[in-house]
Image (cartoon, rainbow, N blue to C red):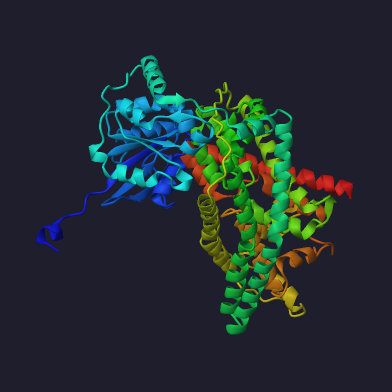
Amino acid sequence: MSESNFNEKPAAPLRLALIGSPNSGKTTVFNALTGLRARVGNYPGVTVERREGTVRLTDRTAEMIDLPGTYSLDPVSPDEAVVGRVLAGEIPDTPAPDAIIIVADACSLERSMLLIGQILHLGLPACLVVTMVDELRARKGQIDLERLSAALGIPVTGVVGHRGIGLDALRQQLARSETWSQPPVMPPSDRIERAAWADSILEHVVEKRPGPHTVTDWVDRIVLHPFWGLALFGVVMVTFFQLIFSWATPVMDLIDTGVSAGSDLSRTLLPAGFLADFVADGLIAGVGSVVIFLPQILLLFSLLYLLEDVGYMARAAFVVDRAMARVGLEGRAFVALLSSYACAVPGIMATRTVPSPRDRLVTILVAPLMTCSARLPVYTLLVAAFVPAREVIGPIGLQGLVMLALYLVAPLAATAVAAVLRKTVLQGEPMPFVLELPSYRIPGLKLWLSQIWGSASAFLKRAGTIILLASMLLWVLLTFPQSTPPADLSPKEAASYALEHSAAGQAGKAIEPLIAPLGFDWKIGVGLLASLAAREVIVATLAQIYAASDPDTSLRTAIRSDIRPETGKPLFDPPTVAALLTFFVFALLCTSTVATMARETNSWRWPAFAFSYLLVLAWTAAWGIRQVFIALG
């Protein structure tokens, strides 16, 4: 190696900004170029999510930042406002990009021309990536990309992101960003003159406009129909929850067996005492009782991502928008609420796409009502333990219908609360809703699997951090201070006595008068307090409590056989189970959600309001449903 080559420094990494309208294929291009490895965070001082990844080029690397989807540099929502600030280098610790990659859908190029003109007017090096060129050909459309490049004065590359077509040529183009040409004629700054400029270019480069997407148009006649669209939505949801229960149960049973075997093995290998109890009851029983629900989490996200990637969820937003408009919300709010089915935190963050500040605040306040995945372990435990596993109509089972009912209560309650808020403390006129419906597409397997793994790994990380730490702390609180039980008690009764007089037991006893009208005892009270860390921690808490009393009995069996000492009747009778399920439908018991609310609203007033009104709503609804079950006998 020569001395000159030895001393030659590698080229500095480029900083590339990826920008495009929603549904243009921008995220697919980003994932394909970065290898599905993205770093996610927020812009400094701005609560808008940022995604960055590294792109490996021929002789250097590039840092690519994926900007929020936008139709224009004239912002109407918080996330769109960030786009212009990033391009201008106005955000601290976020340098302006060296070059811009514009992404546009080949089948709807005219919708991106306004944005293209605005970006070219900035004078930064830019290139255009035209996606979905395969669909353009399938719909008998033709665009001369060479003419388009000459007319715009920038490089243009056609790609099919999910199949990898055109990506090598794009990487070569990105490596030469310093040589990209500039537009021979700068697009006008005036919107009307820019529209004329766009029309002249399209007339010059579009040789044949794409015809209708036959499959999409045919399917949309049913999916978007005012009646059949809602009926299809109902069928999809029923099937959704039937599959979650029926497909996940065998794997869940295997994990349950493994958790029990691990607990028994730890007691065998470790000497009897605090260490063995801590490992068996605190760690394995606590974390294992939540990990057992991983198969259902996987199925939940598999089906959600499939419906989203195929293009159905955008249609669901369109169909539901009619109903939401009656309570003063619009389809963008539905998209945010739909995200809350995974977790309220990203759902609340997704409200940044809602243009109206009042609509955004209403959506934030009702987002915790949506049934997040953290509630799934609670629902599954109680439904599987107390709802008979029998078929109602054909293959449709009662357990799946009960689970569906729990999930349907959430949007009904959210719309009702939103209607009250819009007519009282947050009055205002709703803004019009515009949503571009993508064509139906078969999602790439690699992308779909990566989405599922991302959600599954987040769940496992949560189990390995929050739930693990909560389980360890709970074991300490359930073990100390130690008390001496009366000598005439049986071993099981002595264990229950010790739990009841522990620090956690005393806390549960302290709130028992408040929850007794709901049928809850101090053990459930401890679980409710613990669920403030994360809703599913109540399962880990109950697992530890019952494991301490009877380590050889599964949690499902233990709660079935638990008896109220004062009456000798089951603790978890139908009215109590219904009340507990109802309480978790409404209650905001997640500190991370409260913290996210505070950050997004720049105030603790609204999170405190949400926590308070949802707690009152949960208690009242749980008490009401308990009275109904008692009356029905």
Residue 103 visible in rendering: yes
| Residue 517 visible, this angle | no
Q: In which quarter of the image is the N terminus?
A: bottom left
Where is residue 623 shown, x and y percent of the image? 76, 46
* Left or right: 116, with 418 as reference point: left
Q: Nearer the viewer, residue 249 or 142?
A: 142
| Relative vertical location of residue 404 with respect to residue 548 in this rendering, above or below | above
User: In the image, residue 612 lies at what x, y percent?
Assistant: 61, 41
The residue lying at 26 percent from left, 36 percent from top is 180
The percent coordinates of residue 411 (x first, y second) are 67, 38
Residue shown at the point (34%, 36%) measured from the top left: 86
What's the residue at 39%, 50% (across, down)? Answer: 34
568 to 310, vertically: above or below: below
**In this picture, is 587 found above or below 425?**
below
Q: Where is residue 95 in the image (x, y as percent from the top left)?
A: 28, 41
Viewer-proximal residue, 450 or 328? Answer: 450
Looking at this view, name the residue that lies furthest to the left.
3
Q: How many numbered tags mark residues here?
A: 0
Q: In this view, does 130 lie above or below 474?
A: above
Q: On the rendered structure, is 142 left or right of 482?
A: left
